[in-house]
Image (spheres, rainbow, N blue to C red):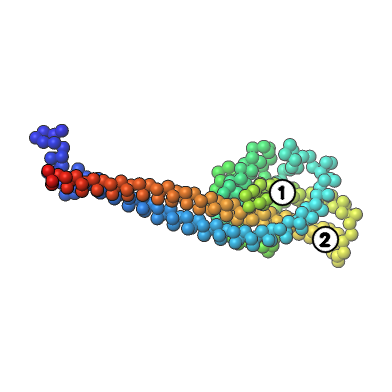
Amino acid sequence: MMRGGSLFKAAGRNGSLFGPGKVVTVQDRGMANLKAVRNRMRSVSSISKITKAMKMVAAAKLRGVQTKQELARPFSKAMADFFKHLEDSTEGAQTPTAASGEPESKKKLIIPMTSDRGLCGGVNSSVVKEVKAMYRTETVHGDIMLVGDKGRDALTRVAAKDIVVSFKDAFKTPPTFTQVCVIAEEILSRPVDTITIVYNQFKSVISQIVKRQVVYGLSFLEENAARFDEYEFETDLDGAAAFRDLYEFQLATQLYSAMLENSTSEQAARMSAMDNATNNAKDMLGRLTLTYNRQRQAVITSELIEIISGAEALKG
């Protein structure tokens, strides 16, 4: 209460408690709330259309890259098994292994593969977590060669001094063997004993797992090249040159397979994430529609009560 009158008299003198010359009624508040809910409904509907379109785009890209991945997987597996026979027969005597199963080495190279774009679930964070786990468990830290842009910021905070090269825009288009050869040449220019490729292996549209692919360096294989004497190569090159060419081709093949696996996992995860976002937007739109109808009914009921009350007052 105020001196000389009520609070409502003061409001009458000054125009309104909500602004000079303006009287805000219950109906005005109700209409303002309706407008806010209507704007939110329009916004959610637009987001739903965008996520649905992104899902369709990811599905189309998934079909294309999955076809390449399915064709490349058997070939890369055969190449890996061929070199694995050499590695298994020599690692016990010359390369001690750590608890993780990877060979102890002073010269290591880690290649985390992440996407160049976000909105693809946890495929990027899973690779980053795997690399961080390697840093926690291993005593010797190797250099890091980043393929993809999304893992750069997270790994820079942990191992900025170990990042030597970063390849951007590697996954904006489906990977090609020519593109992989550029990365392989950069790897071969560095003297390393082991190369660890960390990527997402595609299992299904809803399942992708992080995998470490360990490839021995050229120096280690050259020291044990005698293991290849049991094989005959039909080539005009000498044995050492043929062996080096075979290793370079094998390295590029493993990188190509890993990039295809990671690209397929990215598109599958993005399609699933956009599908979940679309469904969530539809659920939110349904709740907003129910809220809008309730508030609209409340405003209509309030106006009817005022009209009836006014009519009854005129009769009295």
Q: Percent from the top left, x then y, of residue 93?
A: 84, 41
Q: Of all residues shown, which one is farthest toward the front?
A: 315
Crowd tier of the residue under label 1, counting other residues whose Cα lies within 10 Å: few below 14, some 14–19, many 20 or above: some
Mark 1 and mark 2 in contact? Answer it, CB < 8 Å.
Answer: no
| Quarter of the image where the C terminus is located | top left
Specify which label sits upstream in the sequence, 1 or 2: 1
Q: Which residue is mark 2?
A: 242
Crowd tier of the residue under label 2, counting other residues whose Cα lies within 10 Å: few below 14, some 14–19, many 20 or above: some
Q: Percent from the top left, x then y, of residue 214?
A: 73, 48
Q: Amino acid at mark 1?
A: Gln
Q: Secondary structure at mark 2?
A: helix
Q: Is residue 251 left or right of residue 226?
A: left
Q: Is residue 159 left or right of residue 297?
A: right
Q: Tell which tag, 1 or 2, sits nearer the viewer.
A: 1
Q: Nearer the viewer, residue 196 or 295?
A: 295
Residue at 67%, 54% in the rendered image = 261
Residue at 11%, 33% in the rendered image = 3
Q: Secondary structure at mark 1?
A: strand
Number of numbered discs = 2
Q: Which residue is mark 1?
A: 213
Q: Of all residues shown, which one is farthest toward the bottom?
A: 236
